[in-house]
Amino acid sequence: SGALCRELFADMQYLIENKSIQVSMDDQAGSICIEKDLFRIVLANLIRNAFQNTASGTIAIAITDNSFAISNPVDTEDLTETVRFGLGLQLVERIAAKLDWQFDFSLDRHSARVVLRWNLSSVPVSLPSS
């Protein structure tokens, strides 16, 4: 997961090379048990969105075994920027719904944030012995 993020950062470096942007990553994940191709599509869309919609500042990413969060600074006074969140996030939201993941998007005056959570129902359930 952290390795996949770093690979995607390298692939998309051209989107931020002329901007004053830092990326901070907190990788707490041991092993993530989800479909790798879909996970890659989701992460690529979220990272691309953040890179494209950040003029300057820090993009923060946090990964655990069952969640991925990304936030980036935005200037909501420039409405054309916020409109562009559309397609990438719609795709991510559709994939999340199909896989039964929780998808949360929030936008305030200073930042946009997406949190994905998966394996929500995979908590072991103990059945009473008969």
Image: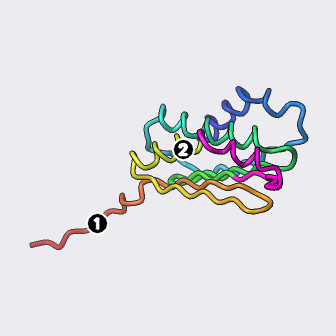
Residue matched to label 2: 90
Q: Is residue 47 above or below residue 29?
A: above
Residue at the image position 14 percent from the left and 72 percent from the top: 129
Image disc number at residue 125: 1
Using a 10 Å C-alpha cutoff, classify the residue at mark 2 as few (fewer than 14 neighbours), some (14 to 19) or many (20 or more). few
Residue 82 in magenta stretch: yes
Q: Which residue is more in the foreground, 103 or 126?
A: 103
Quick check: is 11 in the magenta stretch? no
Mark 2, secondary structure of its residue: helix
Residue at the image point whose x is 36% and y is 58% from the top: 122
Which image quarter is the N terminus in? top right
Residue 5 image position (x, y, % from top left): 65, 37
Q: Quadrant of residue 34?
A: top left
Give the secondary structure at mark 1: loop
Judging depth in this view, the residue of 122 and 13 nearest the camera is 13
What residue is rendered at 69% in x and 42% in y? 84
Numbered disc total: 2
- Left or right of 130, for residue 71: right
| Magenta residue span | 71-87
Question: Which of the labelled discs sits on residue 89, or is there none?
Answer: none
The percent coordinates of residue 95 (x first, y second) are 46, 42
The disc labelled 1 sits on which kind of residue? Val
Which residue shows up at 69% across the image and 35% down it? 6
**Gap in angstroms between the C-alphas marked 1 and 2:** 33 Å
Q: Is residue 48 above or below residue 31?
A: above
